Structure formats: structure tokens, C-alpha cells
Image: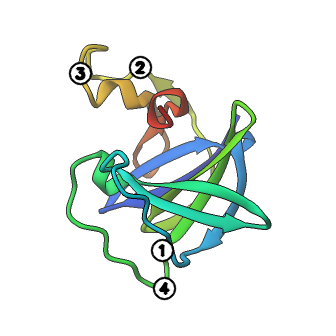
Amino acid sequence: MQYIEFEVEGEHYAVPISDIHEIIKMQEITEIPNGPRYVQGVIQLRGSIIPVISLRRLFSLQKDEYTKMTRIIVVSHKEELAGFIVDRVNQVKVFTDIQPSPYKTSSAYGNYFTGIGLSDERLVGILKLDEVLL
């Protein structure tokens, strides 16, 4: 299976390429009051309103800082679209091995990952979209 690898604050993550709707440049996000703290707001994409999630906020990292490399990865999951703000998109990857998440299932972070992808260059956390898109 192929994955799109991306970075958030120097760490490497991935989602299955089959879940990717498209990858777009950062754009203005309309904030929605009283939403979950990790939901940055919404964008309009060809007539559809799409929620945008800050993975930095979700993972309790430093505040979002956008650069020319910042992207929104729009995923299609369970017939709905959502976006993730990432620092940069790296490449399409095929992992030589995928190990289970090292976190116990009761851990908040463990619920976000289906496993850890092993490649020649690095370890990559594979996001579990069912949990990230609650």
C-alpha cells in the first residue's frame, strides 16, 4: 500500500494515499467559535465547506506557523472531506514493514495511530483517520 508522508514540527507521519482527496496550498481559514480546540476552522473548496484540523493543536505541539511549504491535506473518509494542516508534504512511500503503535490503546496518542511504518530513512507514524476525525 502507498502512503503520503508529511511533516509536523519535524516529526514524520503518513496517511494512505487511497484516503487523499487532494493536497492544496495553505489558504485563509474561517474560524468557527466554540469548536474543538484542534479544529482550526473551515475552508471552501469548489463549493464544499471543509473542516480543517491543526495536527499541531491535536498533538499539543507549538503554535501553528505557516510557511510557503505549509499545505492542507484534504482527505476523504467515510464519504466526508476534512483537511489537515501540515508543515510540508514529503513524498509517496511504501513501507517495508508496519509495526503496531507502541502506545497502549488507552493512551490518547495511541488512539491516533494505526502503527509505525519502517523505511530505510526513518520511522513514520501512520494516522488512524477514524480517531483523528472524531
User: What residue is disc 2 on?
Assistant: 100
Q: What residue is disc 4 on?
A: 68
Q: Are marks 1 and 4 in contact (CB under 8 Å)?
A: yes
The residue indicated by pointer 1 is: 70
Among numbered discs 1 and 3, the one appearing first in the sequence: 1
Q: Position of residue 60 (x, y in %)?
A: 21, 49
What residue is rendered at 42% in x and 68% in y? Answer: 87
Q: Which mark is residue 50?
A: none
Q: Secondary structure at mark 3?
A: loop
Disc 3 residue type?
Answer: Ser
Mark 4 surroundings: few (<14), some (14-19) or many (≥20) residues within 10 A: few
Q: Residue 17: horizontal and vertical position, in percent?
A: 70, 45
Say if 75 sits above or below 40 in the image.
above
Mark closer to the chain start, 3 or 2: 2
Horizontally, residue 122 falls left or right of residue 18, namely: left
Image vertical order of residue 110 relative to residue 40, above or below: above
CA gap, disc 4 to disc 2?
34 Å
